[in-house]
Image (spheres, helix red, strand yellow):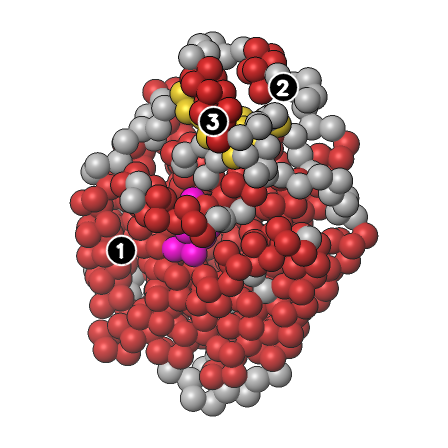
């Protein structure tokens, strides 16, 4: 075992930024279409709000179905081959959508983009290339690139679409995915080891245990509802903004200030959460902001100022929830089951995107933009009720260690000895992986734990 280091080594830094760029380029391509499809797709054959919703959320269905299998395949055949196949499928989907002359074929292209479900393999490779104590830093870099890609896409989408059109955006996503492919094979380091499966990749045999955990289930419901609302919103919001007098080429003037100010407004919530060790109250506050923003949009009555203020309130709540949910999943997942917990979480996220887009399109057809906003506000209220039971996670951190385990009886004895050590809150020992998963809090003596596991 290695000594604990306070910083990333050169390989870890390289892995963090190259894999973050791969993830970010791909997500930028997926997000880029959201703020413009309802407006710039109106020339396509068969255009309707229902099909706009299906095209916006279409990637979510294939992502949801393939995210966990892709992670498992990366465990068997290697991370880079799975990432390569996924990016090639993404490129094909982008080209199908770029050459489409109907909204239906755009939807097919979006579904093909979703089949390039590389997220789990990218995160697993990041884990392979980093030491346990440095892994949260690497994951934070990747997470920040995802958030950045979402923010830039909302601003860049309307601007780029005005000059290159909808097909040009899809060609651009194909180029970006090709660049990501070059990064994977030219810059991303090759892994010399593989992180223990339970830590980074979903294990189907443990899914039932995850689904029975009420705290994890609340977070799975949360990410489903959050992405449902986001995709439903972008079926209706761009059209509502145009109806309020802001031409499509100037939508960035609404999105950019709202996004920048939202990061400022969410800062006090983050500071409160960290200082008070209280995740629950800021989480509930962010949900109330979402609900309030939907109601403001519903009763904006074509006022651009009200829509702008509502968009700011929405992004403040959305960005806080989007940033805090992965952290909560990581802290609340049982030792050794983070991969399975994240697998269910990711599937819930993409299913939310699919249903949000498709149902949002149907709601717009029947009730208009105001109906979409009101239904999303109602969904947030239904979501808020079970979240009142959310508990603050203990202030513990996860540690994965090599273990010398002879048999099941030896594993039980080791687990008892480890649990008797100061600071050890939870222990999972996996005989097949020769690995120990611990959740610990101060004071914890890592060297003493290593000696127990080595002997």
Q: Is residue 26 visible?
A: yes
Secondary structure, magenta segment, majority class? helix
Q: Indicate which disc, 3 or 1, sits on the residue closer to the N terminus.
A: 1
Q: Which residue is mark 2?
A: 454
| Quarter of the view holding residue 191 | top right
Q: Residues within 10 Å of mark 1 (few under 14, many from 20)?
A: many
The residue nearer to you, when weighing 134 against 141, is: 134
Q: Which residue is mark 1?
A: 294
- Check the picture and name the quadrant holding the C terminus: top right
Q: Relative to the observer, which residue lies in front, 175 or 262?
A: 175
- Describe the element under mark 2 as helix, strand or loop: helix
Q: Is residue 431 above or below residue 69?
A: above
In this rendering, the label closer to the viewer, 2 or 1: 2
Q: Residue at x 77, y 45 (%)?
A: 190
In magenta, the rendered stretch is 341-349
User: Mark 3 or mark 1, which is nearer to you?
Assistant: 3
The Cα atoms of the two marked residues, 2 and 3, are separated by 16 Å
| Residue drawn at 27 percent across, 66 percent down | 372
Q: Name the mark on residue 409.
A: 3
Q: Which sits in the foreground, 431 or 229?
A: 431
Q: Position of residue 290 (x, y in %)?
A: 29, 49
Q: Is residue 164 visible?
A: no
Q: Residue at x 18, y 45 (%)?
A: 385
Verify CB contact (< 8 Å) between mark 2 and mark 3.
no
Q: CA distance from mark 2 to mark 1?
A: 56 Å
Tell me how far mark 3 sits from mark 1, CA to CA. Answer: 56 Å
């Amino acid at each position: 075992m290695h000594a604990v280091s306070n910083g990333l080594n050169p390989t870890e830094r390289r892995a963090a930024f190259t894999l973050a760029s791969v993830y970010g380029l791909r997500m930028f391509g997926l997000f880029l279409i959201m703020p413009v499809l309802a407006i710039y797709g109106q020339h396509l054959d068969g255009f309707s709000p229902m099909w706009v919703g299906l095209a916006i959320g279409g990637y979510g269905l294939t992502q949801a179905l393939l995210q966990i299998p892709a992670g498992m395949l990366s465990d068997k055949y290697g991370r880079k081959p799975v990432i390569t196949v996924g990016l090639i499928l993404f490129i094909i989907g982008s080209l199908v959508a770029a050459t489409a002359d109907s909204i239906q074929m755009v939807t097919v292209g979006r579904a093909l983009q979703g089949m390039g479900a590389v997220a789990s393999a990218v995160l697993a490779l990041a884990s392979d290339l980093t030491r346990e104590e440095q892994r949260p830093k690497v994951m934070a870099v990747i997470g920040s690139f995802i958030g950045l890609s979402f923010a830039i896409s909302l601003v860049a989408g309307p601007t780029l679409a005005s000059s290159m059109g909808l097909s040009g955006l899809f060609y651009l996503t194909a180029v970006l995915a090709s660049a990501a492919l070059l990064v994977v094979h030219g810059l991303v380091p090759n892994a010399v080891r593989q992180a223990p499966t339970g830590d980074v990749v979903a294990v189907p045999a443990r899914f039932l245990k995850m689904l029975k955990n009420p705290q994890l289930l609340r977070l799975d419901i949360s990410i489903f509802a959050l992405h449902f609302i986001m995709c439903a919103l972008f079926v209706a919001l761009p059209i509502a903004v145009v109806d309020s007098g802001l031409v499509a080429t100037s939508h960035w003037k609404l999105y950019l200030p709202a996004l920048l100010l939202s990061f400022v407004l969410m800062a006090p919530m983050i500071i409160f959460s960290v200082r008070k060790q209280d995740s629950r109250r800021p989480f509930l506050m962010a949900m109330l902001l979402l609900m309030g923003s939907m109601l403001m949009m519903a009763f904006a009555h074509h006022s651009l100022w009200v829509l702008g203020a509502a968009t700011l309130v929405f992004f403040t709540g959305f960005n806080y929830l989007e940033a805090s949910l992965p952290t909560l999943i990581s802290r609340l997942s049982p030792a050794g089951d983070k991969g399975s917990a994240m697998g269910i979480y990711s599937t819930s996220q993409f299913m939310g995107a699919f249903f949000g887009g498709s149902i949002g399109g149907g709601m717009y057809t029947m009730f208009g933009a105001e109906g979409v906003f009101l239904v999303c506000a109602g969904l947030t209220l239904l979501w808020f009720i079970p979240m009142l039971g959310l508990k603050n996670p203990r202030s513990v951190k996860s540690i994965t260690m090599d273990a010398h385990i002879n048999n099941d009886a030896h594993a039980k004895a080791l687990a008892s000895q480890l649990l008797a050590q100061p600071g050890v809150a939870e222990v999972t020992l996996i005989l097949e992986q020769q690995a120990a998963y611990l959740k610990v809090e101060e004071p914890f003596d890592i060297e003493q734990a290593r000696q127990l596991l080595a002997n």
